[in-house]
Image (cartoon, rainbow, N blue to C red):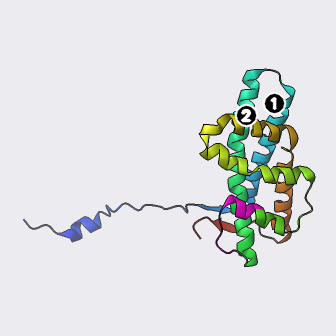
Amino acid sequence: MKFNEDILKQFNLEVNEEKEPINVMKIGDMLGFMKQSAERIMGKSKKYRESMDAEIQADCLDIVTARLNDFTQVFKDLVIFMRKKEGTHKGGTSLRYCMASYETFGFDETEEEKMFLRELLLRNEITHDYFNREIHQQKLIWLMENCADGAADIYKNIYTYYSTRGLLDEYADQNR
């Protein structure tokens, strides 16, 4: 008996996989994530300052560490997208490049915002240098005590940039 592929085709046995876009997100959603991260950084920093309980303070440090990482990553992606929209992106993707780029947009920066922006590099140190964990933790505590509210100022400036240009529904593609 011969095998006939036409018979198999009639049964439609092929699996149709639906593929969803990967690494694509609306600017408005990215900004929402940034706002959530900023609010958690500020809220947990405040709770850390107000608490005398070492366990609560440790939990706050852990949460701020995670949210600082989230905030920093979305900050980088949004600044790179801003540069691309203006046609001034030269291919840089480092945190230092994005911090320097942010300052060139001429935002009216608060003092807390400037301090927080300078301290974003702490995210890299925490992530990549566990040998000096204690030093980085002290820097994180300083950030939490002195300039955590600067995260909201950065968010507001970036949100204003995108909303005034009608870019909230644009898609950012991390692969481009």
Q: Residue at x 85, y 50 (%)?
A: 115
Q: Is residue 84 left or right of residue 6?
A: right
Q: Secondary structure at mark 2?
A: helix
What count of labels does the image hold? 2
User: Vertically, is 131 above or below 92?
Assistant: above
Q: Which residue is mark 1?
A: 48
The amino acid type found where label 2 is placed reads: Leu
Q: Secondary structure at mark 1?
A: helix
User: Vertically, is 9 above or below 115?
Assistant: below
Q: Residue at x 9, y 68 (%)?
A: 2
Q: Residue at x 31, y 61 (%)?
A: 13
Q: Position of residue 88 (x, y in %)?
A: 73, 77
The amino acid type found where label 1 is placed reads: Tyr
Can residue 78 be seen here? The reply is: no
Residue extending farthest bottom: 87
Write down the quadrant of residue 41 in the picture. top right
- Most foreground residue, 11 or 108: 108
Q: Position of residue 38 (x, y in %)?
A: 79, 47
Q: Position of residue 5 (x, y in %)?
A: 21, 69
Write down the quadrant of residue 134 in the picture. top right
Magenta residues, start to end:
89-99
